[in-house]
Amino acid sequence: MKKNRTPKYWLTPPALYNQLNNEFHFDFDPCPYPYQRDGITAPWGKMNWVNPPFRTVDAINGHGPTAFARKAIDEQRKGKASVLILPVQSYVNLLIEAGAEIRPAGRVRWINANTQKPDPGPSTCCLFVLRPTRSTG
């Protein structure tokens, strides 16, 4: 089965953007549609709205979400702020909404249960810590 490599573009719903813009007052968008510049090499503003291409095939120069996350971190070190919207699995939002503490676990080399050997391709993981909530009763 061949994967669809036709570029797709998804625009931020205006109500969501307006709500966030009212709070953060964006002065730059490194990924406006239609893409006219490489948002990774372009200088960013002081407060950035970042809705990056979710697939590298959709991006200029193949820069997907990870490249934009790295760029936002670099811009943070320069005293700039960014709000990124990125796709996540639904269970991540469920855990965040439940108040989970999130910790990076790094690249985990899981052990194969049959061979007892580490997986050659580690997966990037996070820990989600849910602590008891106070009872109201």
Image (cartoon, rainbow, N blue to C red):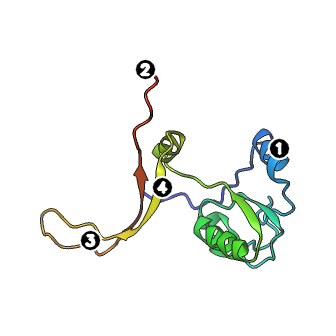
Q: Residue at x 75, y 71 (%)?
A: 39
Question: For numbered disc 2, what is the local secondary structure?
Answer: loop
Tell me if residue 101 comes above or below residue 112 in the rendering. Answer: above
Asked whether, in this view, residue 73 is left or right of residue 38, the answer is left
Q: Secondary structure at mark 1?
A: helix
Viewer-proximal residue, 47 or 134?
A: 134
Q: Nearer the viewer, residue 30 or 58?
A: 30
Circles 3 and 2 in contact, beta carbons < 8 Å? no
Q: Residues within 10 Å of mark 2 (few under 14, many from 20)?
A: few
- Looking at the picture, which amino acid does disc 1 mark? Asn
Disc 2 marks a residue whose amino acid type is Gly
In the image, taking residue 72 as reference, residue 79 lies left or right, namely right
Q: Mark 2 vs mark 4: which is more N-terminal?
A: 4
Distance CA(mark 3)–CA(mark 2): 47 Å
Residue 44: percent from the left, percent from the top? 80, 72
Q: CA distance from mark 2 to mark 1?
A: 40 Å
Q: Which mark is residue 33?
A: none
Picture coordinates of residue 100, whole percent (x, y): 47, 47
* Residue picked out by circle 4: 102
Q: Which residue is under mark 2? A: 137
* Mark count: 4
At horizontal 61% and vertical 65% (from top left) the residue drawn is 65
